């Protein structure tokens, strides 16, 4: 029985609907939310372990065998992503319990957060191209609501841009799907892979691949990231953290899935186009991270640098580099969650957004300051924190593949990340204190705990990388050998 | 049939792009609506429009039309419906808050 595979999407979806009816009582909403999230984490963990024992598992909806029906496929890659996304969203929503304004809680903040998680988990698990589009839309519609929630001139203007750009991206997705279906006549990812391999990736299929690349690049903020800093810096802390931790990662995941499983034949697209896009993204992100003084903007540009770095692994295209990218994806979900929560907290506590306007916060909020320092080290990839192991494997892969230029760009970006983050730390936390001890806003321990837990998680992933390694290697092995995925989809499934 | 449909899709995309590039918010939203119609037509054309009979057994001996694209389009229509509705409400709220439906004016608010 593989029915467990649908739960990571079904559970948040149902919880979201239940929460709609619990609107009058915020307390009941919180209790239901936390119970649902904890079971979500437990289920994702179980799926990961089941895949470890049984290999890749799949669930054919309605008993329609592939390639005819829609199916969910769980391999180590998707299960790892689902588990990380569940853990991170649990902690972020835990933080949101104390940090969300009452009027937003009353206007369905929690249901939409759950719909977002449902869309994200669905995108990770689906094995059908059109279903991927639908899950993307579930996730995006929830994000449209979350980004506009609360209103205000600036946020509405930013939302307008965000939604417009995503509608156009979704349009490109449909165009790509139409051409793909017209060419290979199937939408099951494994089946597409087989047919593309049979037909050879000719000019038409390569064009389709590039359209898919544009779609996922728009969603992930790879190269086409112009919309990202504005949109991610306008919503309040918890929502920005959910976005930064989950949304771009789904784009990166989809890119890995399509280009390792389906369109892996064309070296020009993989090496040259994706490699160039990754390098330009990293450089652009670095420039932005150094140029801005608004801490939310700096954090947003750090998201862009990380996306570029993960995609470097795809451009290098060998098993070692995939392993690094998977580690880095896991790390990045955690670290971007913690970064945006801290940045949101800083903006809330001081009422300012620029690094030039804040100083000496370490006297007022010492724990928050040291957590930011921990995040800084984690982002830069200093051992034993979680960023190091991913960077190391991507580096090893790049050396193995002889991509020394990509290696250089990737590692040079770490220094820029370190500089941009230290700039926040030193300007905002060191120096003269601007807020009197008596006047300072309270930052209760209830809020600090989720951030601290995320901090513990980033240390845990770094120190416990050994325990995580078998799962990550398995994920990388499947990516490097698409045949394994295809066999699992077309093999017999016992029920 | 396919030939004419392709040209129609091209015209619709042209119109949509023209609308999307204007400064007026409502025009942009109409642009996204037209854009989604264009892609729906494209999907149905891709699967071979007007060929085959109704995909019901015993109705005819085949060849049957491909039923899948229609299911896909139905899903896509619902999604574009929802997005357009949301965008219209958002445009109205933005107009209420900023007193303008011009994207250039709204962008300037952003920079301040």
Image (spheres, coloured by chain):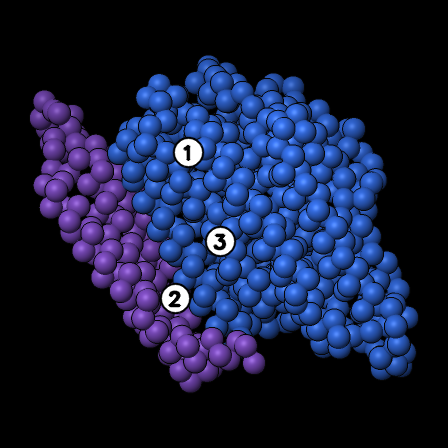
Chain colours: A blue, B purple
Front disc: 3 or 2: 3
**What is the secondary structure assignment of the residue under circle 3?**
loop
Residue B44 in percent (x, y) is at: 21, 41
Chain assignment, label 2: B
What separation in Å lies between label 3 and label 2 (alpha carbons)? 22 Å
Element type at marker 2? helix
Chain of the residue that carries numbered disc 1 in the rendered image: A
Looking at the picture, how far across and down is residue A40, in whole percent? 63, 42
Q: Are marks 3 and 2 on the same chain?
A: no
Pinpoint residue A291: horizontal percent, then vertical percent.
Answer: 66, 65
Left or right: where A239 falls relative to B18? right
Q: Is residue A297 above or below residue A70?
A: below
Q: Whole-Å distance between the Cαs marked 2 and 1?
A: 28 Å
Subunit that carries the residue with mark 3: A
Q: Residue B87 — which label?
A: 2
Question: Which residue is disc 1 drawn over?
Answer: A128
Most foreground residue, A384 or A25: A384
Labels 2 and 1 positioned on one and the same chain:
no
Q: Residue at x 61, y 50 (%)?
A: A282
Element under label 1? loop
């Amino acid at each position: 029985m593989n029915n467990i595979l649908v739960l990571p999407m079904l559970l948040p979806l149902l919880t979201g609907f239940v929460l709609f009816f619990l609107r009058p009582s915020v307390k009941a909403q919180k209790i239901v939310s936390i119970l649902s999230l904890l079971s979500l984490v437990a289920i994702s963990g179980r799926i990961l372990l089941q895949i470890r024992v049984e290999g890749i598992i799949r669930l054919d909806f309605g008993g329609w065998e592939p390639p005819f029906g829609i199916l969910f496929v769980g391999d180590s890659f998707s299960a790892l992503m689902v588990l990380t996304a569940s853990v991170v969203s649990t902690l972020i929503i835990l933080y949101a319990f104390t940090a969300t304004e009452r009027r937003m809680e009353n206007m369905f903040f929690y249901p939409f957060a759950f719909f977002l998680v449902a869309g994200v988990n669905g995108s990770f698990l689906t094995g059908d191209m059109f279903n991927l589009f639908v899950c993307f839309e579930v996730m995006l519609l929830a994000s449209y609501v979350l980004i506009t929630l609360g209103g205000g001139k600036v946020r509405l203007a930013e939302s307008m841009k965000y939604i417009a750009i995503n509608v156009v991206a979704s349009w490109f997705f449909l165009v790509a799907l139409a051409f793909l279906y017209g060419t290979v006549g199937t939408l099951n990812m494994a089946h597409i892979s087989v047919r593309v391999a049979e037909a050879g990736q000719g000019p038409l299929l390569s064009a389709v691949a590039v359209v898919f690349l544009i779609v996922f690049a728009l969603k992930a903020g790879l190269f086409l990231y112009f919309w990202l800093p504005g949109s991610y810096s306008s919503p309040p802390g918890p929502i920005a953290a959910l976005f930064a931790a989950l949304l771009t990662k789904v784009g990166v995941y989809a890119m890995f899935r399509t280009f390792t499983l389906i369109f892996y034949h064309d070296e020009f697209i993989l090496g040259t186009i994706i490699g160039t896009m990754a390098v330009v993204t990293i450089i652009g992100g670095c420039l932005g991270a150094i140029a801005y003084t608004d801490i939310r903007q700096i954090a947003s540009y750090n998201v862009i640098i990380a996306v570029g770095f993960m995609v470097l692994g795809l451009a290098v295209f060998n098993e070692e580099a995939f392993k690094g990218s998977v580690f880095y994806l896991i790390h990045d979900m955690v670290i971007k969650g913690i970064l945006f929560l801290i940045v949101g907290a800083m903006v809330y506590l001081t009422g300012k957004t620029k690094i030039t306007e804040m100083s000496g916060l370490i006297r007022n909020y010492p724990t928050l300051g040291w957590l930011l320092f921990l995040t800084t080290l984690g982002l830069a990839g200093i051992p034993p924190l979680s960023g190091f192991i991913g960077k190391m494997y991507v580096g090893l892969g790049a050396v193995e593949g002889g991509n020394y230029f990509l290696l250089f760009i990737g590692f040079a970006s770490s220094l820029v990340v370190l500089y941009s983050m230290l700039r926040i730390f030193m300007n905002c936390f060191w120096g003269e204190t601007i807020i009197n001890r008596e006047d300072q806003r309270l930052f209760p321990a209830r809020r600090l705990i989720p951030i601290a837990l995320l901090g513990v998680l980033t240390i845990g992933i770094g120190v416990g990388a050994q325990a995580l390694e078998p799962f990550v290697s398995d994920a990388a092995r499947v990516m490097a050998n698409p045949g394994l995925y295809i066999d699992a989809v077309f093999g017999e499934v016992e029920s | 049939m396919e030939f004419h449909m392709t040209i129609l899709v091209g015209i619709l995309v042209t119109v949509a792009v023209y609308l999307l590039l204007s400064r007026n918010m409502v025009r942009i939203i109409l642009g996204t609506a037209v854009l989604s119609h264009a892609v729906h037509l494209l999907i149905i054309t891709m699967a071979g429009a007007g060929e085959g009979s109704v995909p019901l057994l015993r109705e005819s001996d085949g060849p049957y039309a491909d039923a899948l694209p229609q299911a896909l389009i139905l899903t896509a229509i619902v999604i574009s419906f929802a997005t357009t509705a949301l965008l219209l409400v958002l445009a109205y709220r933005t107009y209420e808050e900023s007193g303008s439906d011009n994207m250039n004016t709204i962008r300037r608010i952003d920079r301040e």
